[in-house]
Amino acid sequence: MAESILKLKDVAVFQKENLVLNEINLEIRKGEFIYLIGKTGSGKSSFMKTLYGDLPLQQGEGTIVDFDLRKLKEKEIPYLRRKIGIVFQDFKLLPDRTINNNFVFVLKATGWKEKSKMDAQIANVLDKVDMKTKGFKFPHELSGGEQQRIAIARALLNDPELIIADEPTGNLDPQTSVEVMKVLQEINKAGRTILMATHDYALLLKYPSKTLKCDGNKVFEVVQKAV
């Protein structure tokens, strides 16, 4: 049996005092590719923020990549995020520096010191997303699809056990979405676990996989035919 990457038991998700999701019980195992679907406002983003420590877990039990979310302290969050790669819909690249320097910023923030090791890791992740010649460019010099590939590469910098992708194809046209999806599929085939929030049901049909749905304050698994 593959090891557990994420386990939630009777979890409630709050946004300040407001209850967003309730009675969440689920387990994600190493190597799985899981979609998270649901209407805007159904709680997908709050759910994901709870997983990477942006919202505190106030009720229930939760462990993610060996961290206890209920006991998570502020100072432990950077260590948690070394083991989780996060990909955002709007890329969140720093516009005032090149791609290489965006990556150096992340590596230094997560405790890397040696320049030669940082350079090697940057080359390694850019190669994985087929962008190895683009490191000297600034974000605005790249297309949306290229920026999202860069954002995926950035999520791989610390060799995470889990990648959380929040609407990674939300701002992309259908063709580019498929290209980004292929990159994520390759990363998953290499053994990484991926949890991906999406509105793009065409991708779900093209690349079927286990699917969770946020609806009516709950998170539950759906059979794909019902999508």
Image (spheres, rainbow, N blue to C red):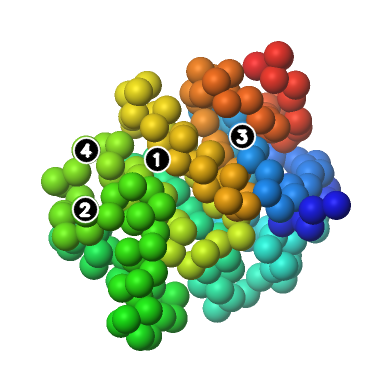
Q: Which label sits in the foreground, 2 or 1?
A: 2
- Ranked by sequence position, the earlier of labels 2 and 3 is 3
Q: Nearer the viewer, residue 154 or 185?
A: 185
x and y percentages locating residue 46 in the rendered image: 57, 45
Amino acid type of disc 1?
Gln
**Label 2 – label 4 distance at C-alpha:** 11 Å
Q: Residue 89: which disc?
A: 1
Numbered disc 3: secondary structure: strand
Quadrant where the C terminus sits is top right
In the image: residue 129, left or right of residue 96: right
Q: Nearer the viewer, residue 18 or 101?
A: 101
Numbered disc 4: secondary structure: loop
Q: Are marks 1 and 3 in contact (CB under 8 Å)?
A: no
Label 4 packing within 10 angstroms: few (<14), some (14-19), many (20+): few
Residue occupied by mark 2 = 134
Name the outermost residue toward the bottom.
114
x and y percentages locating residue 166 in the rendered image: 49, 42
**Label 1 – label 3 distance at C-alpha:** 15 Å
Q: Are marks 4 and 3 in contact (CB under 8 Å)?
A: no
Q: Residue 35: which disc?
A: 3
Amino acid type of disc 3?
Tyr
Above or below, 209 relative to 149: above
Residue 17 visible in the displayed image: no
- Ranked by sequence position, the earlier of labels 2 and 4 is 2
Residue at the spot 69% in from the left edge and 40% down from the top edge: 21
